[in-house]
Amino acid sequence: MQLPAKGTGQGDTSASTTREVAHEVNSRELLGNSDQLVIHHEQRRYVLRRTKSGKLILNA
């Protein structure tokens, strides 16, 4: 008897098969020419900021 391949949805009940694929966005699309982006989420304000060394920091 041959089992279905993992991830085919046939007989595979792992949690990974029910998750949606993450939406990917290039940071340049979000930040543009600015070094920061304000995000409003569940009545809170977050700031995504690009550092001088090119890394990203998210602060509430």
Image: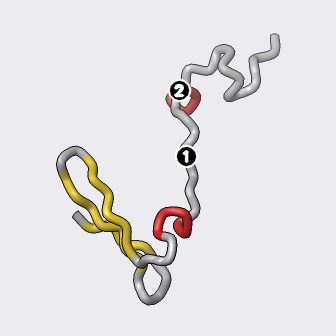
Please name whichever residue, 15 or 58, is drawn nearer the observer in this view of the structure. 58
- Amino acid at pointer 1: His
Q: In terms of secondary structure, where does tag 1 sit? A: loop
On the image, the x and y values in percent for residue 23 come to 55, 46
On the image, the x and y values in percent for residue 6 come to 70, 28
Q: Earlier in the sequence, mark 2 or mark 1?
A: 2
- Structural distance between the alpha carbons of marks 2 and 1: 15 Å
Q: Residue at x 62, y 20 (%)?
A: 12
Q: Which residue is mark 1?
A: 23
- Amino acid at pointer 2: Thr
Left or right of 11, for residue 55: left
* In the image, farthest residue toward the left: 43
- Residue 34 position by quadrant: bottom left
Judged by depth in the image, the label closer to the viewer, 2 or 1, is 1
On the image, the x and y values in percent for residue 11 come to 64, 15
Q: Is residue 7 above or below residue 58?
A: above
Q: Which residue is mark 2?
A: 18
